[in-house]
Image (spheres, rainbow, N blue to C red):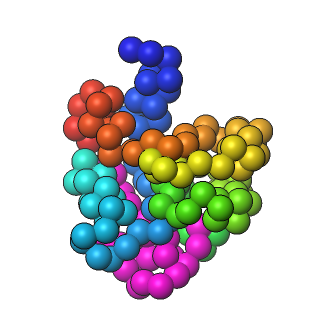
Amino acid sequence: MKPEDQLLASILAGAETIAVIGLSVDPSRTSHRIASYMQEAGYRVIPINPGIESALGEKAYPSLGDVAERIDIVNVFRRSEEIPALVDDAIEKRPRAFWMQKGIAHPGSARRLEDAGITTIQNLCIKTAHRELAQTPR
């Protein structure tokens, strides 16, 4: 296994809670399908979306900063140009990883997060990584 795959597998194996920024209640949306898959895989999914009250049976929060509990992975479904606005809350929450979905990247924000000790993944689908790297179901 490549070192970067070992890192991703370790992050996924060590995580229990995933905050999904931009989670939609619409089952046809990619964010909903991927979050539902991760929930079915055994992770607790916390929806972050100011426009909804709940999703996938969990209370939704307007922002990452509003979540009181520990978050292991922040999984982001927002446009790349919106990433900088999420960085301060993420640094305050101190997740193991800040994971930008496929098609999402922001190198400047990634540097800030990495400098704060938060592993940052860009342009990679968490569901795809989980399917390829998870050793055992959660």
Residue 118 visible here: yes
Residue that sits furthest to the top in the current view? 1
* Residue sitting at x 53%, y 52%: 104
Locate residue 101 relative to residue 39 in the image: left or right: right
Picture coordinates of residue 37 (x, y %)?
25, 54
Locate residue 123 relative to residue 94 in the image: left or right: left
Picture coordinates of residue 65 (x, y %)?
64, 69
Locate residue 92 relative to residue 73 in the image: left or right: right
* Residue sitting at x 59%, y 48%: 105
Is 67 placed above or below 2 here?
A: below
Is 50 placed above or below 76 here?
A: below
Residue 111 on the magenta segment: no
* Residue sitting at x 55%, y 78%: 62
Residue 53 on the magenta segment: yes
Picture coordinates of residue 51 (x, y %)?
47, 85
Residue 97 visible here: no
**Quadrant of the rendered image containing residue 35:** bottom left
Q: Which residues are magenta?
A: 42-64
Q: How many marks?
A: 0
Q: Nearer the viewer, residue 24 or 73?
A: 24
Of the 4 image quadrants, the one containing the N terminus is: top left
* Residue sitting at x 27%, y 27%: 135
Of the 4 image quadrants, the one containing the C terminus is: top left
